[in-house]
Every structure is written in C-alpha cells, then in structure tokens.
Image: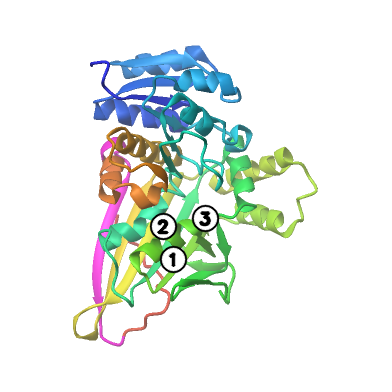
Amino acid sequence: MSAGTPLIGILGGYGAVGAAAARALAAEGGFRLRIGGRDREAAARCAAALGGHVEAEAVDARSDAGLERFARGCDVLLHCAGPAYELAGRPRRAAAAAGADYVDVMDGCGPGPAPAGERTAVLSAGLSPGLSGLLPRLLTDGRAAPGAARFTGYYVSLGAFTRTGAVDYLLSLDRDYGTPRARWHDGRVVRDAPRGAEERVVAGVPHPVTVYPYLPQELVGQARALGLAEARWYNGFDGRHLLDALNRHRSGEERAGGLEERAAGVVRASTLDALGRSPYHVLCGVLELPGPDGALVRRTVVIRGEDGSAMTGVVGAVAAREVAGARVPEGVHQAARVLPARDVVDALRRHLPGTVVAFTDDVLAAGADAADPVMEEGVL
C-alpha cells in the first residue's frame, strides 16, 4: 500500500471491541492499521494475526502526551478502549491535536465543546447507542415517514457484564442519555407512560421478557429527522437479577457503596441471569404506517447477534471507514444520523456470520388496533 492509503489507529485495538473492529477493517482492505494499547506484546500479537499493513504501538490512554503520539500520522483515531469514564475526553482531544478525525464507539463523554482544531467526529458508533438508532432509518429507507407513522423499538440482551462494562453502564444511568417512562408524541417528549416494567414477547427472543420504557435521545433525534408521529423504546431484561440490581441503583438503595462495589454487584447479577444459557443481543424495530384502503402496514426488523462486543466493533469499523473515505461531513455527529444503515447491516452479516437480520412486512385489516404492538416471536 502507498503512504497515501488512509491510516486508522485503533485505541484498545486488542480488546474485545477493538479486535473486532480491526478484523473487520483488515478484511475490508484499503487501509493501514495501527493497533494500540498499554501491552505492546498483546498489540503486536493482534497485528501479526491480521497480517498485511498493520503496525503495533504501546500507548497509555490515560496519558495525553502518549495519546497524541499514537494519533500522530493517523487519518482517523477509532477509540475502543475503556473504561470510558476514566479516559474522559482525552482520546478525542488527542486526535484533534494530532490532526486526525475521530470515531468513538461510546458517546465521546457526552455533549460539550469540540476540541480546538477538530474536523470530523462520529460518536456513539456502537451497539446501543449506535446500531439501535439505525432501526427507524432501516424501516423508512432513510426517508421522511408519513405523518401518522409510529415506531416502537426494543433492545433485549443476555450475557455477563465485564467490570469495565458494568462501570460504564452504571454511569450512563446518571447521564442525560434519555428519559425514563417517556415517548415521542407529535413533536415533543411526553413523560406519561402509565406502566413501568412489564412482560412482553419480543420478536427474536424465544420467551417473554421484562421490558422497561425508556426514550433515548438517539431516538428523539431520529423521530424528529424522519417526522415520526410517535416513537417508543423499551429496554428488555431476560432474567430478574440484573433488573433488580439496576432498580436498587435507581432507587438510591445501593448508592451508599462505592462505584466499584456497585459494578461488582451488576457483574454478579448479570452472571446469574446468564448462567448456563447462550448469550445474545436482540434489537427489534416496528414501524406502523397507513397503507392503501385504510389498512395498517407494519414493518419489522430484527437484528440478533451473539457477541455484543463484536457487534460494537463492526459498527465502529464502518464508522471509521466512512470517515476515512471522506463520506462524513466535517463537524460532530451521532453515528445513527450519518452511517449508511444498510451498509452497517451488511457489514454485520459479512463479518459476524452468527448475526441474523430479518425484515417482515404485514398488512393489517382496516380499523385494526394501533396500540403498542406486542410482538410475536419472529422466525429467525
């Protein structure tokens, strides 16, 4: 490859997320890669396994100077390291200082002023947020929806948290990612959900699960952009232990303990739920819109994968590819607003053979009940 071939630096490149991103980018071809992490030997092993034009460098993500050295010469810095709360905005600032564009599988540490000199940044390029926010665009083909269109989305997962994942997840509950028990209705957020947690059957999940209404800012942005009349979102829990632990956190019952202690509780609870069972991640989106002759058209997409870290890595890889190819304009963007939705789905199928994506269209009789759809299990 020539020196003009885009160089993508992957911070945390030998971790579960970063390694998946690196494999996807290496398989796509057309890039030079730089694998970075504190353990240079681990980075070198990852680089050697990928072959081709891949280099390895040791970098401590908690060092501003080290991060800037790692990012220097990169066209794009893809941040897959963690825990995000410890790194704050360091990787993003380092990318801007080194003249590199930036992609973050997390949120880039939330809203705030862009670092001086930043050109292009894509944030929340992961599983949720990220892939979750693409569901409405997959069902509308990215076009404005008819005025009466209603969207309902679900994210259900089963699997043991890592310590880093548990810490980041707990901190996300205290940040402005969304509004509990709320929905989007006629151009505004309405906090009026009459029920909290309830049992539902969700397409792609073989048995009823507990779902909780939570309206993410990501979906608010898509609802506004696509002109949806109504939008709802539910987070699902396959088991009681994790849900109980999170409820204790929300109620303040466990806030007296330290963050590490509470994270350890989340790890234990998620492990108990997953004990002896196969892990999975299911994203389900349902779009209801008026059809001909007063009929109701219901479009559904279900994405099911086995490894959430690998799915996150592939979404991050697509974002880095798009930025490196100058297909994302300058400025700061949420991934769900700028990534090509169909290309992301194709990449998941291509790089993660265990991932299943299913689309269905149903036409309901005129006058059919348009209440919240209670999903039936999809054929996957």
Please state which amino acid type lies under the numbered disc 3.
Asp
Callouts 2 and 3 close, C-beta under 8 Å: yes
Q: Is residue 125 above or below residue 101?
A: below
In the image, what residue occupies the spot 46% across and 24% down? Answer: 98
Residue ID at (42%, 62%): 153
Mark 1 → mark 2, Cα distance in angstroms: 7 Å
Q: Is residue 203 visible?
A: no
Gap between marks 2 and 3, in whole Å? 9 Å
Using the rendered view, name the quadrant where residue 10 is placed: top left
Q: Residue furthest front?
A: 117
Q: Name the residue under label 2.
A: 205
Q: Quadrant of the N terminus?
A: top left
Residue drawn at x 47%, y 29% as measured from the top left: 95
User: Pointer 1 and pointer 2: residues touching (CB < 8 Å)?
Assistant: yes
- Amino acid beneath label 1: Val
Quarter placement of the C terminus: bottom left
The percent coordinates of residue 316 (x first, y second) are 39, 38
Left or right side of 291 for 218 = right
Q: Which label was assigned to residue 238?
A: 3
Pointer 2 local density, CA inside 10 Å: few below 14, some 14–19, many at least 20:
many
Identify the residue at the far bottom of this view: 367
Which amino acid type is marked by label 2? Val
Is the residue 293 above or below the residue 161 in the image? below
Q: Where is residue 221 drawn, in percent x and y?
A: 43, 60
Label 3 to label 1: alpha-carbon separation: 11 Å
- Residue bearing mark 1: 201
- Give the residue at the far left of this rendering: 292
Span colored in magenta: 350-367
Instruction: Label 2: state its secondary structure.
Output: loop
Residue 283 versus residue 360 in the image, above or below: above
Residue 118 visible within the image = yes
Vertical position of residue 340 compared to residue 36: above or below: below
